[in-house]
Structure formats: structure tokens, C-alpha cells
Amino acid sequence: MIPANETYLLNRVQNKGSETLASYREHGGYVAIEKILKENTPFDQVIEELKDSGLRGRGGAGFPTGLKFSFMPDPEKDPRPRYLAVNADESEPGTCKDRILLREDPHGLIEGILIACRAIRAEAAYIYVRGEYRKEYNNLFAALAEARAAGLVGKNIAGSDWSCEIWMHKGAGAYICGEETGLMESLEGKRGHPRPKPPFPAGFGLWGQPTTVSNVETLFNVPFILNRGARWFRTMGTEKSPGNILCGISGHVERPGVYEVPLGISTRTLIEEYAGGVWKGRKLKAFFPGGSSTGLLPASAIDTPMDHDGMKDAGSMLGTAALMVLDETACTVRAMEVVARFYDHESCGQCSQCREGTQWLYQIFRRLENGQGRVEDVELLDSLAHGMAPGKTICALADAAAIPTHAIVKNFKDEMMEHATLGRCPLSHDHSTKEKREPAEAGA
Amino acid sequence: MTTRQVVTIQIDGQDVEVDASKPLVDALHRSGTDVPTYCYHPGLSAVGSCRICQVEVQMGEAPGRVVVACRTPISEGMRVFTSTDKAHAVRRECLEFLLKNHPLDCPICDKAGECDLQDFSFAEGQAEGRSSEPRRSLDKRKSLGDVIVLDEERCILCSRCVRFMDEVPKTPQLTVSGLGARSTISTFADRPLTGNYQGNLADVCPVGALTLKKFRFQARVWNLRKTPSTCGECSRGCSITNEVLRNNELKRIRPRYNADVNEWWMCDTGRFALEEHSLEGRLAGSMIRGEAGMEPASAREGLERVADALRTHGQPVLLGSAWLTIEEGQALVALAKQLGTEARFVTPPPSELADELLHTDDACPNRRGLTEVGMRAIDAAEALEAIAGAEVALLIGERIIETVGAEALAELPNTVRLFSFDTVALDVPAARAALGTPSSIERDGHWVNVDGHRGMLTIARPAPTDVATLIQNFESLSRLITPAETAGGAAS
């Protein structure tokens, strides 16, 4: 039974024509921004409200949103143009939460963008949409056109003297363009190579101007907080991670999907109640709590609360709350081979440790899974991951590959050893039906 | 340009005054601390991607952090530790990744001996690699045009070459293509590189990925004798290093850092002016006119012919080369004074290679210097006119025959008595004697460039035997033409 928690994020998506302006208006849309414009609410009051709400970014890092907005320089002292970059390049393996919002409730995002732009005094927002999200792009594009026609985007919004433009940009399929500085480089028309920080986007962002980068779901939360107040927001979730979160559950469960849950909910409730339990009556073996970049946890961690601190204490991360479930027949080494292949493929190649390390990790996991592993590989994997992270590279992609590697060595060392000593996968998976990818070392 | 701000920081326990407008790595290098760098080059923007320059930094009481020195701004009171266990460990880790796919073909690599990756591996690396995976197999000889060849396997993707093309000649032509470990350096649609600054790519490449086609497999760099000098291909006078192999052949010319002139760079015209110094066809001793034409003779005999002519005929024409040093110019002016004539230098036509970076349109490396010592510049036409109306003419200095024009000189009637001091022999009907002279890598002295900076020449190899310097020859001539009684009188 799905517990009767209060929901707000996904309430409107059930409505017919939820992606239209009419439907959004009918359900209280654009009230928050119109109120702000009518009452000329001071900028810092909006930011204070967000700070009070304790909203943390839903893009994976969990940084407090109000605080991030407050990093933008004072326009009195720094008159440069300012931008909001909206990260809709949802590409973390397992994550599909922003997708539903973009497709079914695009006006909610647009209102969130407008409020954020108003708060940080940005003159334009750029939405970077994942290239594969065609329907999502089209729906958002149509919604934007509707909002523009209704005077809600562009010059003199809702009859006020405030203007704000929103532009859309389609990604071309690189995971690294979801990294905030890679995203900005890509938006500028360059290769999506992340920039070294500092300087941070608030000082030197898009085209070198002050910029805030924010995730879709984060911005989607903003109108709700302004309409209903920070206190209401804090009635859901935990003290340090308030609010609801969209949790995408995939893998070996009966009912995979995107569920809206309060932060801090136990992983057991998510798997057993929301997702209908592990499929085919099998037992849980392991799970990635928040996408492939978060450490693989064993079944014993099933009671870990789904929030930033809970997952951190369990030795993993909340990430994007994309729960990926592995049943007892799954091989964790095989799972990591797939994950490592992904990072090998997606590393931008700037930093030495990441470029060479992601490839090296993949080569070892593949060897181990295919029966050419050695006992010392387990140690080597851990040591390589240590050489790649934390914080040893320009962006966090190396960390994203290193974290699950550390986790599998910590949590599933025996299974790895078994692969090495047996000279094969103990679960005797037959991967032959799946076409093997060309070896990574074959070159470009 | 950011202005210099001096602050005091501590590097490995020593207080050092450093320039805070530069990244930390610059301060480390200036203070003599050896921290390796691959993607960082002082003349290019810092991207902080290779991660090899990691050091430990402590601010106040906060615990030490590992940072990349090339992207770390300097602040007062910063304490930097370059050789703590942690700093060594992170650099070693990074090095292991860099070597993961590097072919380690140092024995056949032109860069061996001056390769940053080789040096650092030798200093810090572990003797055995932990990787048993096959290395990347990519194109080992990809042509990037007439100048550069790329070995994709050796490339460590530091992107210095990409940034050089973008930032220095401002002709973006290179890019990193592909993702991750499949990345390679390439040009758009594999087009060949163009421009007059391609040779610098081989200098900025920290490994043996980009090498000069002309230098490939020509020499092991540790066999090259290196001497500082100045380029003579235009009036910029870039500071260079001449690199000579054991057989005295000039194998390579490379730019030498000079903040006022060329910084780290030089153009390909100067870099590949190797033929100017070829030992083939060099004139040693002299050639004098005998019954069967020009015949080999000793330098002494040649010089006596010159002196004879100067003694018997008045109003000689003295034409110096634009490549004379200021010291040679001064000596020539003194000689001209003694002979009661004027010393002039002949300028080649303006160069069409002028650009916004280094190359000027003036091919004279010492126009300013020679003008300052009192010589007047004339062009080849004016020079020929002067020679044609004279009884005796002296053509003095390297490349003078080429500048005035061997063909035009051949047209002169043999009533003109022509004498030359050049690296090659003058063989025209009017020639009476031709003496060898040292080329610009065989003599020392100074040139003054277009902006008034002095560039020095040093001897990179000895001149052929029986070739005296111009200054020695001028002194000898001066003695030989001085009437004996005056000389005796002066001596008594």
C-alpha cells in the first residue's frame, strides 16, 4: 500500500491536457509570479523565503537553493547582465524525474524560472534540454510559446515593468553537458568541457556573466513554496532535507516508475510499498540509491532513509533519488561493468585521472566479469578510484566513477574475489545474446 | 596585462616574495621549485586539466588542501608544500594515469632527452606499471601539414597546441576531438595546418606527440650543442638557440625566451633558415683572379689583392651587408674614414611575410644598429649604380652577394675591380678576389632590432679554417694600406 503522504509535485500531471496554459491556470498557475510582480515583492524576500524553506537542489548535489541564489553579486556594484541556466539535461543513468515534469507540466517549470529570474535579477534564462527528450522539448517549446503569447514571458510580464526572456537549447547527447560548467560551455557553442572552479558561475558563468545554474525539479518546487510558504514546505521531509522529491525507481521491481515521496522516507517503503517489492518474488541484493554515480548499497541497507544525510551516513549519496534495484540473480560486478563503461564513454577527456582512469576501471571490471580477473584487481580498483577522487579533477565525473567503485569493493568484495578465483562470473550470466561493445582500447 | 603585485608566501618553509598576479605555479618555478607541468605553459591560458602540478596549500590554521598550482591564485601568507608525502603521492597517482596509454617508445622518440613526461617519470615514477591492459593503438604518424607530424599515441591531451593556435597566432586550427580516452588532436576535416608559426607546436608539446618533419630522426637532442643567439631573418631579431650536431651541422633553431622581443615564440621562416648555414659550398680561404679565372688561394693572398687595389685606386666603394653586427659596422666605418670614403649597407627588398605577431616587413636584422654607427642604408639598385661608377668596390659581409644580386654583378664591366667578403665565392668577370667570412652562427657581436633591443650572436661552431673575422680583416687592411713611413713614424 502506498502511504498517504501529501503530494504536490505530481498532482497536476494526472489532469487531461496538463501541459497547456489553460489547465495550468485552472489549477492556480502563474499566481505566485503575478503576485510578486503586482506587489513588487523585494528580491531578497523571495530568496529569504527559499532559504527558510530549506529547499535543496534536486540535481544531485543537494546544495541549498536559497543560498545559491544569494551568491549572485549585488547589481548595484556589478551591473553586468545576469542569467539563469536551467539544467534539463537529465542524463544520469536511472534518472527520469525531470522528464515527467517537462513533458506533462512545463508551465510549472516556466513559472519557477520566472520567479528565480526575478529573485536573482536575471534578464534571461536558458533551458538546456537533453537532446533525446524530443516530446519533452516540444511540449516545453509549445508551453513557452503559449506563455509568451499570454504576456508571461518576454517584455513587460503580466503588465509589469519587468521583462525576462526564456530561451531553449537542445543538447546533443553528452552526459558531461549536464555538469553545470560543461552545460554553460555547450550553451556558448563550445565543446562541453567543464571549467575549472573557481571562478564559480555566480561570478563568471554564461559568456562570463553572473549566472545561476539550477535543476528542473528544484525550480519546479519554487512556485509551491512561494504560494504556500516555507513553513508548509517544512511539514514534509526532514529537518535538513525538507519537501518532497521525485524518486525514479527502476530495475528489478514490480512497479517501476516515478513516485513523489517525502524526503527521509525509508528505502524499504519505497521498494516494498511504492514499487510493489522486488519482482518475481525474489530477494533484494543491492541498490543504487540515486543513480549510477552513487555507491551501490547491499540489501542490509534497505532501511536507510532516502535523504541527503541518511544516504551519506550509509556510505552512499542521495544523488537524484533514482533508485535502481538489483535482485538476487543479478551480478554486481556485471552491474559495475555497465556503469564503468558508461563513464569511460562519457568522460570528456580533459583531466588525466578521469580520461585514463574511467577507461582503466571499465577494462578491469570487464575483465573481471569475463573471467580474466585477478585477485589483486580488487585492490587495484580501489586504489585507482582513490587516485581519481575526491576533488582531484576539474568536475565530478571522475568522482562519479570512483564512488561506486569504492562502494562495490567495500560492500561486495567477496563477489569480486569469487569472480577472480573462479575465473568466471559465479552467477554464470550468459551475455552472449547481447552484442559486446568494441573494446575501449581499439581507439577512435 | 595585469600589474605586478608583490606578496610574501612560504614555499617549502622558505619565505619568498612573489608576483600575485600570476598563478602559483609561476611563483614555484621562479623560486626554483621543480613542479612538473604539462597543460600549463606560461605563455598560454591555464586550463588546469592535466592535474600534474598538484601541491599542498595551507591558509591560516585551516588544514592543508591539495590544489593544482596552475589554477591557484596567490594570496599573502599562503604556505605551499611541494614535497610532502601527500603532494608526492597525488602527483605520482596522476603520473600513473598519464602513462596508462603512453607508448613509452622513448628509444625512438625525438623528444627523448627533453621530454617533460620522461623527466618526471624518471624522477618520481614507479619502475613497473600496474596496467596490463592493451594500450591505445592510434595513428603514429599523422601529418598535420608541411611542418608538423602528430603521434596520437604519445599525446597526453594537454591541449597546449590547441591553445597555442587559438591564442598566439590567433588562427584556431586545432581541436581535441572525440571523448575521454578516445580523444585525439585534429584539424577540421583533416585539413593541413597553415601559417608561419606551426613550428612552435613542437616546442609547446610537452611530449613527443608533435614533432617537426624537418627534425624528425635527425639527431638525439643530448648530442646537440646549444648556444644562445639572435635570429637574422627579419628586423624582429628573435632570441634563439642554435643547436649544432657533433659534425658542426646546424640541426635545429629554437626560440629562446625573451620577454621584450619574442617571449617563447618564433616564426617558421626563422626556425627553418637552416640552409643559410649549410656547410656546403662554403668559401674557406679565398679565390683570386688568375689566368684561368678565379683560383683558390690563401686568405692572406686574397687580402693582399684587396690592399693592392685600395692603394692604387682612389675612392673605393664600401658596401656592407645588412647582417653586419654593430661591432663590424663600427670597424667598417673606421676603415672607410681612413680611405676617405663612406660606408653604406645594402638592404634587401621589404619582406611580404610581415604579420601581427613577430615577423616584420624589414629583412635587415640590424638596420637600427648600423644606422646608429653611421652607415647609410641603400637598396640593391643604388648599390649597383655606385659600383658601376667605381674603380674599386668592396662587398662586405654574409649574404651581400645575394642582396646585391649575383646576376646583376655579372653584368658589370671588368673595369670595375670587385672584391667580396662573403660565405660563398663571387665568380663574376669583374671579381678580382673573394674572401670567406664567418656566418652569423660562426661569429659573435650584436644586432639591434626594430624596437632598439640588442640581440647577441655567439659562436655556435667555428668558422672554416683560414677564414678571418671581418674585424680582423679590416685591421689587416688598415695596416696594409697605411704608407710604410707613416707606420714606422707612428711606431717610433
Image (spheres, grey):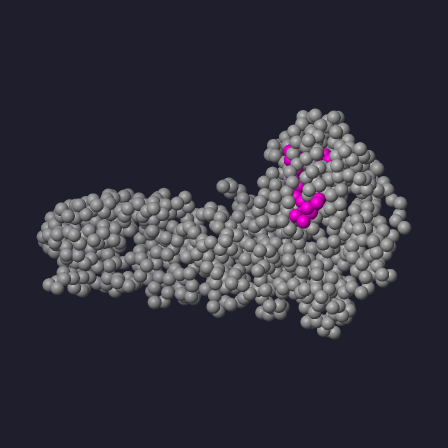
Q: Is residue A192 left or right of residue A278?
A: left
Q: Is residue A115 visible?
A: yes
Q: Nearer the viewer, residue B245 or B161?
A: B161
Q: Is residue A3 above or below residue B108?
A: above
Q: Quadrant of the C terminus of chain A?
A: bottom right
Q: Is residue B110 above or below residue A162?
A: below
Q: Nearer the viewer, residue A19 or B347?
A: A19
Residue B489, horizontal then vertical, whole percent:
12, 52
Instruction: Give the quadrant of residue B222.
Output: bottom left
Stretch in magenta? A111-136
Which residue is located at x 61 percent, y 46 percent?
A186
Which residue is located at x 58 percent, y 69 percent?
B127
Which residue is located at x 76 percent, y 52 percent?
A322
Residue B74, horizontal then vertical, whole percent:
58, 46
Residue B431, horizontal then vertical, whole percent:
16, 56
Which residue is located at x 24 percent, y 62 percent?
B283
